[in-house]
Image (cartoon, rainbow, N blue to C red):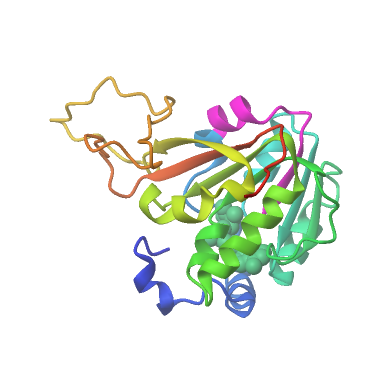
Amino acid sequence: MYRDESACNTYNYGDALYWDARYIQDAGSGPFDWYQRYAALRPFVRKYIPTASRVLMVGCGNAVMSEDMVKDGYKEIVNVDISSVAIDIMRRKHEQIPELQYMQMDVRDMSFFPDESFDSVIDKGTLDSLMCGTNAPISASQMLGEVSRLLKPGGVYMLITYGDPTVRMPHVNRPVYNWKIELYNIPRPGFQKPVDSTSGLKSYLEPIPLTEAGLLPADYVMEDPDSHFIYICKKTETKYISG
Ligand SMILES: C[S@@+](CC[C@H](N)C(=O)[O-])C[C@H]1O[C@@H](n2cnc3c(N)ncnc32)[C@H](O)[C@@H]1O
């Protein structure tokens, strides 16, 4: 996936036909997890998402993440994806795992589900795909509006993305969604700290103290330029009152 969204038109990541073709082509190569595997994300998932939660995995693709979560004790994960090819593959693969459900669905319209029907929503690379499609800002606001609607008060939307706050906060941090955001940054798998690294004691498990505008502090050092961000968007208990 491109980190600079001005260059992502080369692939139609926002297009269902692109993903269907890709999953057909990759059918023999087995599953693939974008960005990060569950093992690396586990500290965040376990911290913010209790195992008894009803979880919605948006844009599940053919990743192993949901299966790994069930092995780790999660009881109910509803997986949706716009690609019917990916959903058919995953439904067949996991038909003996009742904790996993699969449904073909566009995340911009999840009206099938009633309001406040999930405790948590996990998104690994799906908002990023929409940001590479046509009408990206509209698609993003449709998707995020749906995610906010589906979350119970106190529920968490966990967004795993390559997008830093300058490109993601304008979409994610809108009062209408009624959530408070914490941000983490983790290196890509296999990243080796430079030998002259000065931030030897830095813990990736600590949230980044954001500026008033929700941006990275001016002195923030990102050791791995290809690292990933985890946005924890916690829906507040009270309803947002506009005006
Ligand atoms: C970058 S892949 C990530 C897949 C998986 N979450 C992972 O971590 O490996 C993006 C996924 O989003 C799906 N997708 C793209 N646009 C979508 C939409 N509008 N509604 C639902 N899923 C969509 C694609 O089919 C693809 O499986």
Image position, residue 67 (x, y; %) = 70, 43
Q: Say which residue appears at 54% left-offset and 50% top-offset.
A: 174
Q: Say which residue appears at 42% left-offset and 52% top-offset.
A: 162
Image position, residue 173 (x, y; %) = 51, 47
The single residue placed furthest to the left in the displayed view is 196
| In this picture, residue 201 sits left or right of residue 209 | left
In the depicted view, which residue is nearer to us: 76 or 232? 232
In the figure, residue 202 lies in which quadrant?
Answer: top left
| In this picture, residue 200 sits left or right of residue 137 | left
Stretch of the chain drawn in magenta: 42-62
In the depicted view, which residue is nearer to us: 126 or 32? 126
In the depicted view, which residue is nearer to us: 43 or 222? 222
Image position, residue 116 (x, y; %) = 80, 44
Image position, residue 44 (x, y; %) = 55, 31
Q: Quadrant of ligand 1?
A: bottom right
Residue 60 visible in rendering: no
In the image, residue 7 above or below residue 66: below
Tell me how many marks there are.
0
In the figure, residue 184 lies in which quadrant?
Answer: top left
In the image, residue 199 above or below residue 98: above
Residue 124 visible in rendering: yes
Whether 39 is among the magenta residues is no
